[in-house]
Image: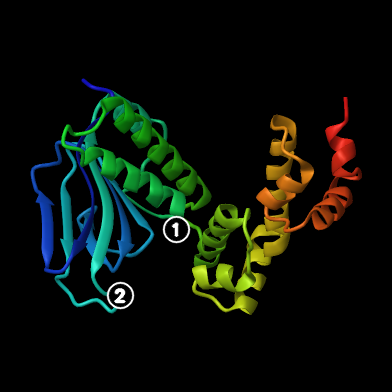
Amino acid sequence: MEGVFIQLCEYSRHVQPFRHLFRSGLDTYVIRLQAEGEAEVLIDGRLVRVLPGDLLLFRPGEVYDLRIGEKESPLGRSGDYYVMCTGSRVDDWWDRQPRPKKTRIAADGRIQSAWQQLILEKRRLDGGSPAILEALFTALCLLLDRAMAESPVSASPSALLALRMKSYIEEHAAGPLRLEEVAAHAGLSVTRAVHLFKQQQGLSILQYAGQIRLAMALRLMDSTNLTLEVIAEECGFGSYTYFHRVFREHYGVAPGQYRRRG
């Protein structure tokens, strides 16, 4: 059996009612992330509501009954990313840890980006390079594992919103970052976002962004010959003067002294 054989991989947006039923059991794995709207899925003999951020995982042999649009939803049309696949590498990934059929994970642009790259590769006329498909699928699975580890079944809505903001900060820390943008990404007011993030993460939004920027700067200082002025700009500090002050406050030495060590 191939390492990863992807039968179907797409983003699906449903205008009409839709039902996907495998009454006799699936012949592939199904990995599905609700991105918009809502759906219903049969789990343990009961129809369960599926909302944005819900990850569905079903394995071969399991009954799969997904229903979309049978009831009018205030959330609008349903949209989802999905992969239907088989293979020894998929078996290995699945067996590494328990896989609940439904898990709420925090929205992460990196997961969606990895999924989109996998979709585009599979759409090629030749069906995509098996090696590239396997690499992209592996990256997607690793991102999903991390999201599931950070979003346990018992995670509160507040914890998930904080994780959503955390992901946004990591993605945008290298550029100008405004509290209003972070809050808007989570659908919160600035006041609520600032309080919730500090409560859940133990750091303020700007403190966390600062830590990300400093970590980026250290990597560039250790692995490139870029000037400190360029590094300050590349890492989102805005000016070398500000970078110098923040770096010295955090590490006790100036950036130039750090770079000349050893």
Toward the top, the furthest residue is 1
Going by the image, does 132 lie left or right of 239? left
Against 78, is 171 above or below? above
Q: Residue at x 12, y 62 (%)?
A: 18
- Residue 53 seen in the figure: yes
Q: Which mark is residue 153?
A: none
Going by the image, does 260 lie left or right of 80? right
- Residue 204 seen in the figure: no
| Alpha carbons under labels 2 and 1: distance apart | 16 Å
Quarter of the picture holding the C terminus: top right
Q: Quadrant of residue 257?
A: top right
Q: Residue at x 42, y 44 (%)?
A: 144
Toward the left, the furthest residue is 24
Amino acid residing under circle 2: Leu
Badge 2 density bin: few <14, some 14–19, many ≥20, Cα 10 Å: few
Q: Residue at x 68, y 55 (%)?
A: 236
Q: Secondary structure at mark 2?
A: loop
Q: Quadrant of residue 7?
A: top left
Amino acid residing under circle 1: Ala
> Which residue in the structure is indicated by mark 2?
75
Q: Which one is earlier in the sequence, the residue at label 2 or at label 1?
A: 2
Against 197, is 88 above or below? above
